[in-house]
Structure formats: C-alpha cells, structure tokens
Image (spheres, grey):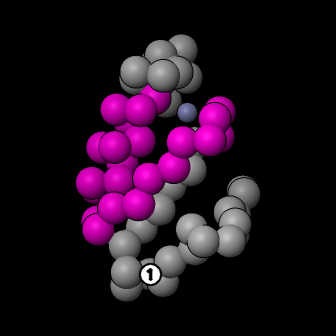
Amino acid sequence: MTTYRRGGYVRGDDDGVERECNLCDWHCVADTYPALVGEYQAHLRSDHPRAWLRA
Ligand SMILES: [Zn+2]
C-alpha cells in the first residue's frame, strides 16, 4: 500500500478526500469518497483506458 504525503495536497479526513493517479501526475480532491471515485474512474477511462478496463 502506498501513502501519499506530498506537501500541499494533504488534507484532513473531515475536509474532503484525495486521490492521486498511480500512472501520471493527476490528482483530485473531492468532498465525498463516492464523488472522488467517480472522478478517478472518469480519469482512468479517458487517460488510461487499459488500466480502466482492468480496474
Ligand atoms: Zn492518470
């Protein structure tokens, strides 16, 4: 498991959730986990279709 703690992007648990892409520099911050998953899936589908198919 990888934990990302890069300066500027770390936020508290009650202040939203964040996801970084393992394949590029994309990252997203959202208010809720379902919203974040949706954003990440959309990113994978458009930018990494092969990874998206595997997910
Ligand atoms: Zn990506």
Q: In which quarter of the image is ligand 1?
A: top right
Q: Which residue is drawn at 44% across and 81% down?
A: 13
Is ligand 1 closer than 8 angstroms to the Cβ of mark 1? no
User: Which residue is rendered at x = 47% and y = 16% of the image?
Assistant: 49
Above or below, 28 against 8 in this view is: above
Q: In which quarter of the image is the N terminus?
A: bottom right
Which residue is depicted at the point 29% across and 68% down? 31
**Amino acid at the residue labelled 1:** Asp
Position of 55 with respect to 31 (left or right) is right
Q: Is mark 1 on a helix, strand or loop?
A: loop
Residue 54 visible, this orientation: no
Horizontally, residue 32 falls left or right of residue 1, namely: left
Residue 12 belongs to magenta span: no
x, y (%) of residue 10?
A: 57, 74
Occupied quadrant, residue 15 = bottom left
Badge 1 crowding class, 10 Å Cα cut-off, few under 14, some 14 to 19, many 20 or more, is few
Q: Is residue 34 magenta?
A: yes
Q: In which quarter of the image is residue 16?
A: bottom left
Residue sitting nearer the eye, 25 or 14? 25
Q: Position of residue 9 (x, y in %)?
A: 57, 68
Name the residue at the front extreme.
8
Query: What span is in magenta?
Result: 22-44
Any part of residue 45 in sight: yes
Please tell me whether residue 31 is drawn above or below residue 50 in the rendered image: below
x, y (%) of residue 30?
33, 61
Looking at the image, residue 4 sits to the left or right of residue 45; the answer is right
In the picture, residue 5 is in which quadrant?
bottom right
User: Against 24, is 20 above or below?
Assistant: below
> Between residues 46 and 7, which one lies in front from this camera angle?
7
Residue assigned mark 1: 13
The structure residue drawn at horizontal position 44% and vertical position 53%, both measured from the top left corner, is: 28
